[in-house]
Image (cartoon, rainbow, N blue to C red):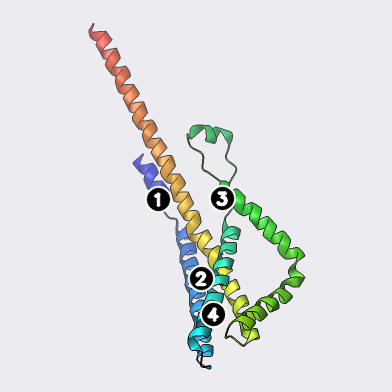
Amino acid sequence: MLNALKKNNEISPEDSLVDERGNKGIIFILFLAILGIGVMILYSCEGGTFISVITTLFFVSGGIFTFSSLIGFLFGIPRTMVIDESEKSKSRYMGNDNLLQVSDWLTKIILGLGLTQIHQIPSMLKRIAKFIKDNTEVSNQALIILILIYFACLGFLFGYLWTRLYFIKMLRDSDNDVNNDEEVMTEVTTKITTDITTGVSTGEDKK
């Protein structure tokens, strides 16, 4: 049993290399995000309404970054492998894959809408930028469009990489813990049953 637990917790050199590269990728994305924030701060310093402008830009960039990270999260969730029926019967518990099904469903919808409405994306960006320009102190519409595109790309990559590197690993570790608990319970039950059977047999022999 201990050997099985150790085997599940072992990390192969290939997985370690992938994790290292993925961590560097996430750090680089966060560095680019900080760089973008620095550009926004420099732009805000030009006018006399620094607080208003930088607050607006922070909310715009943070909102699009969060939204695109969610999209990247949905695209990063993998399909579950098909498990043989004989393997299913060995386990008392089955993982809940509702999130995986929902993500697959939403991903198909997003792809479908994106492909059919891709020609409207430039005009949509212009409308959003114009709305922000007309209702805030930010007067540079081109900068708003650049911020939307820049942080949308960074957010998508961040959400995708985080899902592939950390979320999947958490799901895998959770499944391994459940399987290990089942193995322990099965071994304990078998041992108790064996002890009881042995005790009964010994008592009958003494009689």
Find numbered disc 4 in the image and state the secondary structure of the residue it sits on. helix
Residue at screen point 48% across, 85% down: 51
Precedes in sequence: disc 2 or disc 4: 2
Amino acid type, residue under disc 3 in the picture: Leu
Of the numbered discs 4 and 1, the one sitting upstream in the chain is 1
Q: In terms of secondary structure, where does tag 1 sit?
A: helix
Give how far apart the Cα atoms at labels 2 and 4 are: 28 Å
Residue 98 or residue 181, whichever sits in front: 98
Q: Position of residue 105 (x, y in %)?
A: 65, 52
Mark-to-mark CA distance, 3 and 2: 26 Å
Mark 3 or mark 2, earlier in chain: 2
Front of the two marks 4 and 1: 4
Residue tagged 2 = 25
Looking at marks 3 and 1 on the same chain, the residue that comes earlier in the sequence is marked by 1
* Residue at x 27% of width, y 9% of height: 204
Q: Characterize the local packing of mark 1: few (<14), some (14-19) or many (20 or more) Cα atoms within 10 angstroms.
A: few
Residues at marks 3 and 2 touching, judged by CB atoms closer than 8 Å: no
**Whether residue 38 is situated above or below residue 80 in the rendered picture:** below
Q: Amino acid at mark 2?
A: Gly
- What amino acid type should be assigned to the residue bearing mark 1? Asn
Instruction: Please give left or right for residue 88 compared with residue 128 in the image.
Output: left
Instruction: Indicate whether 107 appears above or below 189.
Output: below
- From the image, tell me which residue sits under label 4: 56
What residue does disc 3 label?
Answer: 99
- Number of the front mark, 2 or 4: 4
| Left or right relative to 65: residue 190 | left
Amino acid tagged 4: Thr
**Residue at left offset 51%, top offset 84%:** 52
